[in-house]
Amino acid sequence: MISVTNVNVDLTNITQELQRVIDNPDTMLLVHARYAQILDPYVPYDTGYLSQDSVEIEPFGVVYTADYAWRQYYGEEFNHKRDVHPLATAFWDKVAMETHIDEFAEDVKEIILRRYNNG
């Protein structure tokens, strides 16, 4: 005996709801807060100002406000200790994502689903 079931699923409302969740600034703050956590061990650390005090989590991204952040990011005058952040490097976002992209993707998925399910 064979049973065949044809299922039609209308994803229009789900897609719109997911987009609403993704477009919500609170959702993106959570996503970027997690992103900043993943990046942190790769951010150069001397006194902690760049890594801890100058980082701002915004709905549109992670911003390092220290006036020297760009020099550290591009590897100019790259003098920092490695005792606190032994993984610290220039282009810290790219290097961190080479290792943690799957973890970050799963975390983002969980954040979005949690926000979707909580309305």
Image: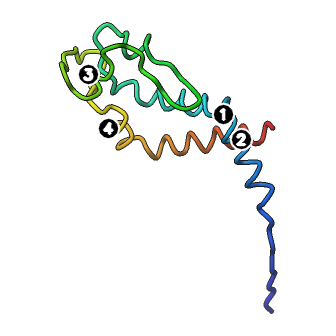
User: What's the mark number on residue 27?
Assistant: 1
| Amino acid at pointer 4 | Val
> In the structure shown, which secondary structural element does the residue marked by tag 4 occupy?
helix
Q: Are marks 4 and 2 in contact (CB under 8 Å)?
A: no
Name the residue carrying label 3: 71
Residues at badges 2 and 1 in contact (C-beta under 8 Å)?
Answer: yes
Which secondary structure lies at badge 1?
Answer: helix
Q: Give the CA distance from mark 3 to mark 4.
A: 17 Å
Tell me where residue 61 appears, x and y as whole percent. 51, 31
Q: Which comes sooner in the sequence, label 4 or label 1? A: 1
**Residue sitting at 77 percent across and 48 percent down?**
17
Q: Looking at the picture, which amino acid does disc 3 mark? A: Arg
Is the residue under label 3 in contact with that under label 2 (CB below 8 Å)?
no
**Residue identified by numbered label 2:** 21
Dot 4 or dot 2: first in sequence order is: 2
**Where does residue 14 sit, x and y in percent of width and height?**
77, 54
- Mark 4 — residue? 95
**Marks 4 and 2, Cα distance to the nearest angstrom?**
28 Å
The vertical placement of 95 against 48, above or below, is below
Nearer the observer: mark 4 or 2; the answer is: 2
